[in-house]
Structures are given as C-alpha cells and as structure tokens.
Image (cartoon, helix red, strand yellow):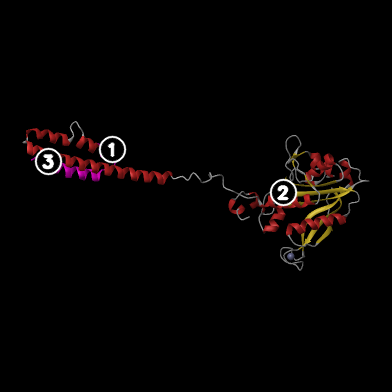
Amino acid sequence: MLDRSIQELESGSLARIASADTAEELETIRVELLGRKGGALVEISKGMGKLAAEERARIGKLLNGAKQKLEGALDARLQEFSAVSLARKLDAEWVDLTLPAPGPRRGHLHPITRIQQEIEDLFVSLGFAVLDGPEVETEDHNFDALNIPATHPARDAQDTFWLDGGDLLRTHTSPVQVRGMRSLGPPLRMIAPGRVFRNESVDASHEHTFYQLEGMMIDREVSVAHLIYFMKTMLTAIFQREVSVRLRPGFFPFVEPGFELDIQCLICGGTGCQVCKQSGWVEQLGCGLVHPNVLRLSGIDPDEWNGFAFGLGLTRLVMMRYGIDDIRWLQSGDLRFLEQF
Ligand SMILES: [Zn+2]
C-alpha cells in the first residue's frame, strides 16, 4: 500500500518538476513534497508507525530514496533555470569595459572650410595676416569707407539685409579691409575670409549666404605686376597646376584701375568648351589697385602708399573644384551631400 503511494508520488512529482517553467513553480513543488509541515513525504511517513519493524525499515529506505531523487531533480532543474537566465542576461547586458566609450560620430571639415584653410596657409607663408571681422557691420565699413556712394545699387534694400538701427549684414568681406587699414596701418598684407549675405532670391546659382575671401597689400610702389604675381601664385596652389591668367577692365568703386581676372579654361586648355562658353577663359575674381579715396578714408596717405586688393568667391571656387552644380547643397546640411568630401 505505502509502496505504491511512494512510487506514484515519485513518478508524478518528477514529471511536474520536469515541466516546471519557473523557479517559483519549483519552490512550490518543493514545499508540497518536502515541507516539514504537510509535505507529501512527511504525510506518508506518518503511516509508518503502525508497521512492523522490518517493514518500517524497508519503507523508510524507500522514502529516503524517493526524497533524495526528488531533491536531486529539483536542484538540477533549478540550476538549469539559473544557467538559462544568466546566459540571457549576459547576452542582453554584454559590455566590454576595455572598449573606449562611444563618443559622437566623427565628421570632417566642410569643403568650404577646407579650401579656406588651404588659401590661408598659402598667404600666411607669403607674409599675410589672416583677419576676422564682424558679420553685422556698420554702413560706413561696408559701403562709405569703400568709396561706394549712397546712390550705388548695392545699397538698395533689394540687395542688402538692413537691420533696425541702420546696421546691416555685410554684403562682402571688404569691410575687413577697412578695419585692417584703420587698426594696423601701412605697410599691410592681409586676407579676410568669411561669410557674407545678400538679399537674393535663392536658386541653383544664388544664395542669401555664401563665403568670400578678401585680400589686400599696401606698401610703397605696389604695381599691377605684384597683383598678377600673387593671383597666379594663389590660383596655381588652388588648382594644383600652372594657370594662365588675363586681366580685363572691370568696375569696382574701391579700386582704380579695376580688373576682372580670368583664368585659361582648365577643362579645354583654352580651345573652347561648354564650361568656358567656347571662349577659352573662365571669370575668376575681381581685383585692382586700391582707390586713393579708400586709402584716404582709412587715414592712409595715397601719395606715400598704394596697394592692390582682390576678392574671390570661396563658394564658387568650391563649386568649380568639386563640380557642384547647385549652390544650395553647400548650406543644406544634408549629410548625403557632405559625406562625399
Ligand atoms: Zn573650356
């Protein structure tokens, strides 16, 4: 009678242990079977008192055997659970403490910044200072001191962002020339790269915000030959090959004489193509000898000093060098565009 109870309890319990899903379930089974108060094995052993001594010993052995088996099965199953949950935890929370902390994603310089730094390095090696100026300028620095009269179309509200109080967003980097002449005086060799603003309607070749680089050299007896030398040196460095240049007369209020400087087309070598519109030449920058009025307005005596100045569009240069056909890409912040450089 007791034999059967023990056997049934044993086989039934082993099956329950095998199909238990959680450690909590196992603990419930353990209490039900092995608990000192009301555990199934204890209840069975209570019936042993009525048995003969021999029989009692035999049943006692059976009970002990069943107890050990069940304990063993419970422990083994419990270990399986903890091994699985540990593996799962390790998998989910795996961390290699020897790895460097994940920082922000590494980027690179914008193509405009890159070309700007190249030109800065070149001019520094030629003894020029790199000057900076504010983007919000006075009317004097941006126009008057550069010999740009009040009647000049550049001063129209259509072309310039005017601010309350009469200041404006600078329309070119030339006001930095004025600041350089006034603060440093002659002799002066300076360049001024920076951001400029025009009140433009935006399309593939026009932006309200773009980049220029301005340069100026003031000394005694500076000639157009000096100007051509520095421009050729700069353009050869930018395009990394020998370039031929030519000057055409051009009007800018702050220089006299003023020139448009063209380079011989780098695509066709001067024989004529689409890029140079079959002329063999590509317009590159504006330049000239500094107008005596501009010197005078910044406190420099034009009888003693003269100089040259030039200004070029960094944005356009970048577009030419990398073959970018829409100016709006440059300020778009679109990583798909920027990651190509
Ligand atoms: Zn060409």
> Eyeballing the image, is 127 above or below 37?
below
Classify mark 3: helix, strand or loop: helix
In the image, 147 versus 240, the foreground residue is 240
| Range covered by the magenta-colored residues | 1-27
User: Taking 329 as reference, is 21 above or below it?
Assistant: above
Against 211, is 279 above or below? below
Which residue bears the numbered disc 1? 24
Q: Secondary structure at mark 2?
A: strand
Q: Could you say where residue 260 lies in the image, as x and y percent from the top left?
A: 81, 56
Pick the front one: 165 or 81: 81
Circle 3: residue type? Ser
- Between tags 2 and 1, which lies in front? 1
The Cα–Cα distance between marks 3 and 1, rounded to whole angstroms, is: 26 Å
- The verdict on residue 2 being magenta is yes
Work out which residue is located at the far top of the displayed protein and give it.
37
- Provide the residue designation for mark 3: 5
